[in-house]
Structure formats: structure tokens, C-alpha cells
Amino acid sequence: MAIIAPSLLAADFRFLSEELEKIKKADYLHFDVIDGLFAPNITFGIPVIESLNKGEHLPYDVHLMIENPQNFIDRFIDLGAEIIHVHYEGNNHINSSINRIKEKGAKASVVINPGTPVSFLEEVLSIVDMVLVMTVNPGYTGQKFIGQSAEKISKLHFLREENGYNFKIAVDGGVNKNNADTLVKMGADFLIMGAAVFRSEDPESVISYIKGLKR
């Protein structure tokens, strides 16, 4: 069964309570934390998560598209993040970041952008809990899916099976009902979806469809 994490970046922040009610049957709530330096956008961070902690919520997974992510790992986990995604790109301390996430009791996910090959992750595949394949360039919701990036899912699935690794494969960027089944059959376990959920006429039916997908 596929896991779905709607991305808050695609929600209508004028009606945030109502937007969160639409996705209450999802598995996780995904936060795209962008600082305007690592990627060309500025989104939200600690204050938004702190405010959401005052009510009931889905488990959090937090995608750190920021410079020096290792400086913020503890803070986001202390706020309740169960999964922390950190990029391979620009991270000189990827091993220490992964280890710190795990030491704090959260699941560690390493992220690769569309231009980064799977081969760059060879040294960390045995220690991560998840690999997140970006199928758009980081920054904005609603971008067009980059089909070539999806080929990395099959490569990761092969490496996972061949070596007995235990990491999950996540996909983020342009994921929707039209391509989700194919991605799951390629090996994806965890689908991050923004506009395809929050801007759907029936978000609950999208969530149910995704959760019913099987390899």
C-alpha cells in the first residue's frame, strides 16, 4: 500500500484549518522548508509548525531545502517531525546529518535533485531510512513532472533488492493520479503530492486512491 504525504505548500493559507481537514486521512503532512538560498523560493519554517502543534495533526515529514540543514535538525525533530529529508547536494556533512537525525529518533531521508545521479548515494544507501527522488527542480509547487528523473526509482529499487537494503523510496514533484500507479510499480513507496491533492475537487478520493495502490 502506498504512503501519501500532501505538501502544505499547495494549500490555501487563507483557510488553513479547512485545508487540513480535507487531508485528515493521509499518512503524513509534508513541509517544504525553503530559505531562498538553496532553492529560489521562501516558504515557511518553525513558526508555522509551532502554530499547528496547538491542534490535532497528521505526523510531520519535513523537507529541508536550506543551507546548513544540520543546524536545524534538532529543532524540527523537537517540534514533532518524524521524517527529516536532507539534500545530498551542497551538504558537506551528509553522513553526520543522517546520523544525527537517527540519533534524535526520527527517520533519515536523503534527497537528490533531477540532475543528481543515484550513483552519488552509494555510500549512504545502507544507513538511510528513505531516499527522496525529486521529479521537479526544488522551489515551487505545481511544476511539470520530469519523466527522466523517474528512472531513478527503478535503479534504487534494483539496488535495494540486490543488496537487501531497507530504505523506502519517496517521490516529490508533479505526482498525480495519472502517474502514481506507474511510480509505485517502479518501486516507489511514499508519494508526496501538493496541487494534485489540495487543488483537487475531491482531495479525500485522491488520498484513498493513492493509499490503495500496490506494487
Image (cartoon, helix red, strand yellow):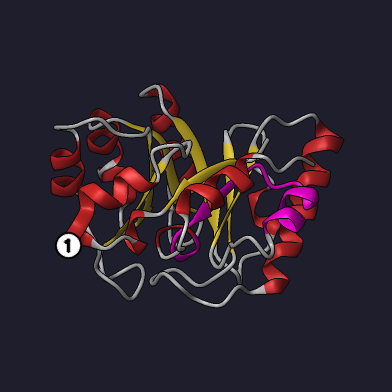
Residue 149 falls in image quadrant: bottom right
Disc 1 element: helix
- Measured along the vertical axis of the image, is residue 10 above or below residue 115? above
Where residue 172 sits: x, y (%)?
A: 54, 58
Which residue is pictured at 50% across the width and 72% down the height? 137
Q: Which residue occupies the extreme right position in the image?
A: 162
Where residue 162 sits: x, y (%)?
A: 86, 37
Q: Is residue 210 magenta?
A: no
Judge the density around disc 1: few (<14), some (14-19), many (≥20) Cα neighbours within 10 Å.
few
Residue 181 falls in image quadrant: bottom right
Which residue is pictured at 44% across the width and 68% down the height? 138
Where residue 99 sits: x, y (%)?
A: 45, 31
**What residue sits right under mark 1 in the picture?**
14
Between 15 and 174, the residue placed more toward the observer is 15
Between 16 and 78, the residue placed more toward the observer is 16
In the image: residue 148, left or right of residue 34: right
Which residue is pictured at 50% across the width and 63% down the height? 196
- Measured along the vertical axis of the image, is residue 215 above or below residue 193? above
For the record, the magenta segment spans: 180-196
Where residue 112 sits: x, y (%)?
A: 56, 58
Is residue 124 at least partly visible in the picture?
no
